[in-house]
Image (cartoon, rainbow, N blue to C red):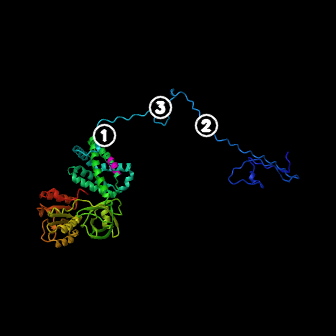
């Protein structure tokens, strides 16, 4: 039986911690505390002084063994005779050998011997043969009716397999798909004119620099192109056809890469150009004057591609409307066409101070000043822009012995926005003749007018003023007009090599 005068305070389950007892030192925060019994504390102090506990004996210093001189001997592992094979683990489920299970590594399989014959990769490096071109044309004839699906599949393969190149293309791919197949057709059909095909591919390679195209992009693009053609060529696609396409693509890509690398040594991939003047000549035609940020080389009759800040990565072609000027300014005639993103932005939204991007100059519709032949220039609508540039260069370099005949076509008189400027040039140069032609309603019956513009369709008006033998003809304007005028001149005896336009190159 315990004394009433003594209260024992213990630590343990269900009791207060030692640190909670007044008069005892607390443990450091967060430190682990050892639980030990607390001696009984009497409520009344005893008469005798507390006993002093004996001093603890001094701890002996630890014994450190000396450093060994020799490394310890490691006994050889005891294992059964190596000649006796151990048990081979088997998969838990023999019917599912693909499960992850431990087993001895299989014996290496020697590589299969290469089949006899030429290496397929080396065969693809050879130039295309006449048989290859025949196979390419035959497969294109099958793919052409479904070209929209084939090209859509081609771009899907590129973007799925190489998503990093998607940023190089515009958001809307409709125009880009059309241009791809037209380029393929031109390359396949241009095999009979190697010089012309090479010039076209070199210009194409330089132009692709503005998209950010690099040499490493050409290989994956070729593989995706072959895969798309194989899917839509049907029974026309064979191993021989694939080899023909790989040979052709290697030739095409090597020419484009070579041209791009050469062009990169002397010119940037694009130029910045500030709009310094914007004149509305008609409700849907504007004349823009642009100042490039550095010297821009081009020739009269050429064209370039423009990108606006409102439609990134969407490029459209426009011809230069003046010959190179001492002040370096560039002039363009732009007509806003229905659903034309770039043309509508340039006509209705662009203003002085806006900055455009320009690709390199392209096109072979330039003057040969060593020729000396008289010129026939036919421009419909804004197709008069390159004709105006050719006139300026012709009168500057060859007005003394070369006559120039210009036919300028439009539907209504108010659409002949450049007529006054051409007539001013004609007054200063006696060998320049300008003939306006109206074809719209109210223009009157077709025929030659004694005063004012001629009436009728532009190609027929050109035919009435023939013959044009001995002249070099330059054509620009709506594609239908260019094709019809080409037929008129061919029937009139003008050789095909003297009829120049850039209809197929754009």
Contact between labelled residues 3 and 1, with CB atoms less than 8 Å apart: no
Q: Are marks 2 and 3 in contact (CB under 8 Å)?
A: no
* Residue span colored magenta: 216-223
> In this rendering, would 59 be left or right of 123?
right
Q: Earlier in the sequence, mark 2 or mark 3?
A: 2
Q: Residue 458 carries which label?
A: none
| Mark 1 and mark 2: Cα distance apart in space | 61 Å
Is 356 in the magenta? no
Packing grade of label 2 (10 A; few <14, some 14-19, many >=20) is few
Pinpoint residue 459: horizontal percent, then vertical percent.
16, 61
**Residue furthest out toward the left:** 467
Q: Name the residue under label 2.
A: 72
Say whether disc 1 or disc 2 marks the residue closer to the N-terminus: 2
Q: Is mark 3 on a helix, strand or loop?
A: loop
- Horizontal side, residue 22 vs residue 282: left or right: right
> Who is closer to the viewer here, 273 or 435?
273
Residue under label 3, please give it.
94
How far apart are the alpha carbons under marks 2 and 3?
A: 47 Å
């Amino acid at each position: 039986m315990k004394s009433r005068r003594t209260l024992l305070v213990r630590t343990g389950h269900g009791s207060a911690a030692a640190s909670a007892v007044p008069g005892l030192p607390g443990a450091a925060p967060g430190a682990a505390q050892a639980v030990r019994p607390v001696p009984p504390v009497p409520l009344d102090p005893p008469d005798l002084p507390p006993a002093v506990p004996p001093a603890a004996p001094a701890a002996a210093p630890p014994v450190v063994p000396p450093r060994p001189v020799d490394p310890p001997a490691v006994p050889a592992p005891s294992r059964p005779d190596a000649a006796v094979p151990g048990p081979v683990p088997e998969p838990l489920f023999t019917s599912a050998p693909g499960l992850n299970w431990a087993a001895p590594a299989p014996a290496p399989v020697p590589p299969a011997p290469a089949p006899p014959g030429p290496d397929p990769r080396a065969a693809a490096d050879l130039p295309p043969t006449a048989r290859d071109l025949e196979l390419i044309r035959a497969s294109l004839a099958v793919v052409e009716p479904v070209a929209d699906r084939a090209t859509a599949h081609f771009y899907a393969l590129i973007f799925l397999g190489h998503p990093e190149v998607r940023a190089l293309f515009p958001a809307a791919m409709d125009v880009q798909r059309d241009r791809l197949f037209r380029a393929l057709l031109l390359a396949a059909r241009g095999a009979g004119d190697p010089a012309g095909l090479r010039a076209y591919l070199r210009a194409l390679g330089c132009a692709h620099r503005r998209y950010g195209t690099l040499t490493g992009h050409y290989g994956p693009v070729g593989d995706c192109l072959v895969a798309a053609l194989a899917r839509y060529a049907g029974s026309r696609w064979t191993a021989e056809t694939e080899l023909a396409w790989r040979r052709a693509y290697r030739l095409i890509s090597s020419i484009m890469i070579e041209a791009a690398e050469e062009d990169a040594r002397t010119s940037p991939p694009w130029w910045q150009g500030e709009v310094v003047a914007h004149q509305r000549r008609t409700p849907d035609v504007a004349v823009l004057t642009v100042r490039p940020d550095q010297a821009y080389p081009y020739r009269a009759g050429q064209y370039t591609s423009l990108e606006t800040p409102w439609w990134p990565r969407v490029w459209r072609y426009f011809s230069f409307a003046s010959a190179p000027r001492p002040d370096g300014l560039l002039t363009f005639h732009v007509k806003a066409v229905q659903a034309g993103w770039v043309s509508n932005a340039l006509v209705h939204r662009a203003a002085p101070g806006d900055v455009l991007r320009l690709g390199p100059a392209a096109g072979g519709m330039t003057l040969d000043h060593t020729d000396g032949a008289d010129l026939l220039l036919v421009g419909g609508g804004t197709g008069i822009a390159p004709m105006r540039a050719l006139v300026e260069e012709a009168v500057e370099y060859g007005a003394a012995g070369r006559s120039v005949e210009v036919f300028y076509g439009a539907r209504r008189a108010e659409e002949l926005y450049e007529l006054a400027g051409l007539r001013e040039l004609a007054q200063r140069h006696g060998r320049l003749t300008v003939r306006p032609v109206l074809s719209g309603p109210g223009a009157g019956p077709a025929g030659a007018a004694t005063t004012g513009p001629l009436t009728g369709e532009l190609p027929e008006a050109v035919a009435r003023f023939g013959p044009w033998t001995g002249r070099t003809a330059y054509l620009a304007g709506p594609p239908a007009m260019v094709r019809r005028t080409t037929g008129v001149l061919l029937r009139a005896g003008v050789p095909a090599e003297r009829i120049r336009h850039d209809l197929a190159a754009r």
